[in-house]
Structure formats: structure tokens, C-alpha cells
Image (cartoon, rainbow, N blue to C red):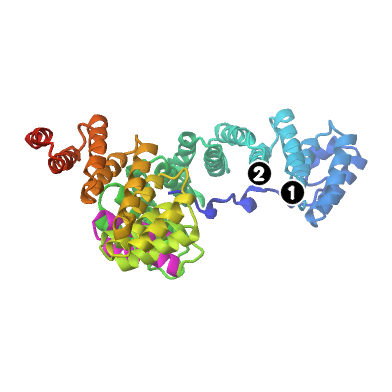
Amino acid sequence: MTLKSDALAMLLAAVIHAVALVGFTPAAGAQEAAASPPEALNVFQDAANFQNNGAFKLAVEEWKKFLMRWPKDSLAPKAQHYLGVCYMQLQPPQYSQAAGAFGDVVKNHPKFEMLQDSLLNLGWCQYSLAQAGQQDLFATAAATFDTLAKQYPQGKYLDQALFYYGEARYAAGNREEAIKGYQAVVSNETLAKSPLRCDALYALGVTQEEMKDYASAGKVYDVFLKDCADSKLVDEVRMRKAETVLQAGQLEEAAKMFASVAAIEGFPLADHAIFRQAFCASKLDKFAEAADLYAAIPTKYKESGYVAEATMSAARAYYRAENYADAAKWFQATLAAKGEDAPEAAHWIARILIRDGKPAEAAKVAGDAVAGAEGSAWLVNLKLDNADALYEIPDQKAASVAAYLKLANEHADHELAPQALYNAAFTELELKNFDSALPHVTTFLQKYPDHRLTPDVKYVGAEANLQLGKHAEAEKLYADL
């Protein structure tokens, strides 16, 4: 189950730091200003004012002017940092240029007083660029966040560094490393009050769940439900906890938990909860209940991504509950949708029609479906359905023999080939075509000597020989039986 919530989208407002500058004056920064020429201070002040007033494009130009004219000035690290901040604030954000600015700070000014901010923003820019398509930068972003966490183990951004390290690793597909980042947030007592702790718990549980470590995920979800009762993710986590209970084999309890969250008004994942509740019911052989639950999804949640699967699952469950009328209805809905399950749906519709004494309709359904079932695992079933339907039509029995033999020859290695060959022999016996039945018996016994139908085939052979007066051959087959 992969439903990683949008709530874990990066908290941009928390990452972009120092958007506003305290108005710079020589008095406020006497030591730095003492080494700066008056003209440099004026440009710095102009850039700061533009930035403070939200004129980020103008601020970018002033910061660039300052850095071009006074690259060695004591205020250059700040100018470089704030240049990056302003690039991030442009619409749309210019993350590549911002990353370049922050990267220069990190590389050239390792003692910069706001280095933590520069590292965090650099990591965010790299992550954003990776999300936009430069996926190799996920690893780069993770390395930046890792550097921030290791250089400042007691720093003010430790929780963000660890959490976003996990997010970057997760996005890169490295779930093992992602778990380390999330666990580092959750297990650090100094971060117990971090606003990211609940997000880290959620992400940790989801990642463990995706790695099928359901036992560990369940424990994490328990902590989340205890410590994060006010989170908007509570209902989803309750549902995820139910999944871990299901995976532990506690189907009855899991079904109750799924039902509980599915009943929450406005719960956006109710369709998923119902789908899993239905799965539990099916596994408990409560097919009628499972069928009704599956059917509720396409009925109540027409835009759900589970509509196609739930429709087919409802049909199967109704069939297993021996409610053939409703089964046919839902199989027909699947067939009409012309999706990947259409051939299977046609197969079961044909079986229901044969059962209901409507072989002509069954033959048409199966015959029509064969044409569109090339490559489907249900192609041979449909051919057998068609032949079986013809068999049930009195004046089509001879045609059914040809259909059975065609299937047996074209799909000799399929598990249904022996059944088709037996059916051909048996039908010939019924039609009193005894000479025609015997070659099929011989072929069957040569190809499938150990098949479960072998005794039945020998009986057909014995009867055909007996009717032809071949008593010795008949006696031998009867003796084998």
C-alpha cells in the first residue's frame, strides 16, 4: 500500500530563512562595517531595503552588484547568503541560482555565522531541483542535509536536517537510509517537541510498511496515535495500523478497524479502507459481505482508483457466494469497461449462462471475447467455454467436438488441453461415433497418462470398443479401471 501523504511535502516556509533583514546600520554591525567602504555600505543597505520590502528582483541586482564590486568585503558572506534567499523568493523560484549562491557560501566561508541557514537552504534548493526532474540531486541534497546534521549536532535545524535527509533518500528510492533519517528524529530526546516529530513518525511507519516490515510499522503507528492525536494524519494512520494488523493475520480485528475509519465522514481514503475491509471479509470466506463492500466502491466512489478492481472483485465474491445474478451484473460491468479483466469477466459470464441453461448466449459471449483475448491468460478458458456452450446445444454437439479438438491441438501444453481432449472423446461416444472416439482416447493416454481424467478416458475407450465389438480391447481397459 503506497499512500504517502501530501502532508509530508516540504515545509517551505520553515526552510527559507532570513527573508527579512534587520535594517543594516554601521552601529548595528560596527565590526563588519569598519572594514567596508561607505559606497559598499550604501549598496548593502539598498539591497537589504529591497529585500525587506519584498522587491526581490531588485534586491538580487543589488546583491550581485555588491558581490561583483566588493567580493572580499567582510559583508560578502551575508550578501552571498541573502542573494540565495532572494533567488528562492522570486516567482517562480530560481533554485539553481540560489543553490549556486548558497554553495559558494558553504565552500568559501566555512566560519560564516549563518552557515546553518545556508546549508539548510542549499539542501532545500537541491531537493526542489531534484523534484523538478534532476533526480541525481536527491543524493546531493541528502549529503547536504547530512553535513548540516553532523556539523551542528545541537543546531537549531537538526530536526529538519535529519527529516529532510530521510525525505531525500526516500525520493531517491533508498528506503533503508530514509528510515535512518526518520528514526534519528524520532529517537532523539532533544527533538521530542519538534514540529517534525509526528511527520517523522508517519514517514517512518509508511516506509517500514512499504518494505513489508509490518510489525515495526505497527509499533510506530501506535506511538503516532498516542503522541500525535491532533495531527490531521490520525485517520490515515489508524487505517495503516489496520493494515499491519491484517498482515499479522488478525483478519477479524483488521476488518473492524478498516470499517471504523471508512465510516469517518469526509475521510479521503475511505475507498481504500472499504477495499481492504472487503479483502478481510473475503479471506474469512464471508463472500456475500465482501461482495457488498466491493460493490460499494464503484457505487459510492465513482472517481476512486479502485473502481475497476473493486467491480471485478465484487463479481468474483458474488460468484463465490453463489449469488449468480449479482455476479453476472458485476462481471458484465467489467466486460463493458473493456479493461484488462474483461476476458476473465467474459469467461465467468459464459459459465453462468451455461449454468442457467442459456448455452447459445454463452457461446456468443465466449466467442466474441476470444477475438479480443489474444495474450490473455483467459484465452483458453474462453475457447473451452465456447466449446462447452456448443455441447449444450443439441444440434451443435458435433461442432463442439471440433472446438474441443482445436483447443487441444493449439494449446497442447495448457492445463485445460486434457479436459478438452477428454470432452471431445466423450462427446463422440455420446454421438455414437465410436470409431471417432477411439483415436482421441489413444492420444490422451499417450500424452497425459497420469492425468486425473485418465480413468474417465479409459472408460470412454472401453465403452467405444465394446460398442464396436472389440471385446478384448474393451476388457483390457475395464481391467485397468
In the rendered view, tell whether residue 176 sits above or below residue 206.
above
Tell me: 426 left or right of 221: left
Q: Amino acid at mark 1?
A: Pro
458 drawn magenta: no
Query: Which quadrant, please, contains the C terminus?
Result: top left
- Among the two numbered marks 1 and 2 on one chain, the one whose residue lies closer to the N terminus: 1
Locate residue 124: give its quadrant.
Answer: top right
Residue 134 visible here: yes
Identified at 22% across, 38% down, the residue is 438
Magenta residues?
272-299
Q: Amino acid at mark 2?
A: Ser
- Foreground pick, 244 / 357: 357
Identified at 42% across, 43% down, the residue is 210
* Percent coordinates x, y for residue 151 in the rendering: 58, 32
* Percent coordinates x, y for residue 4 in the rendering: 49, 50
Tell me: 395 left or right of 20: left
In the drawing, what numbered circle is on residue 93?
A: 1
For the residues bearing labels 1 and 2, Cβ distance under 8 angstroms? yes
Residue 235 visible here: no
Helix, strand or loop at disc 2?
A: helix
As drawn, the residue found furthest toward the right would be 39
Q: Residues within 10 Å of mark 1 (few under 14, many from 20)?
A: some
Identified at 41% across, 59% down, the residue is 365
Locate residue 71: give its quadrant.
Answer: top right
In the drawing, what numbered circle is on residue 18?
A: none
Q: Which residue is mark 2?
A: 128
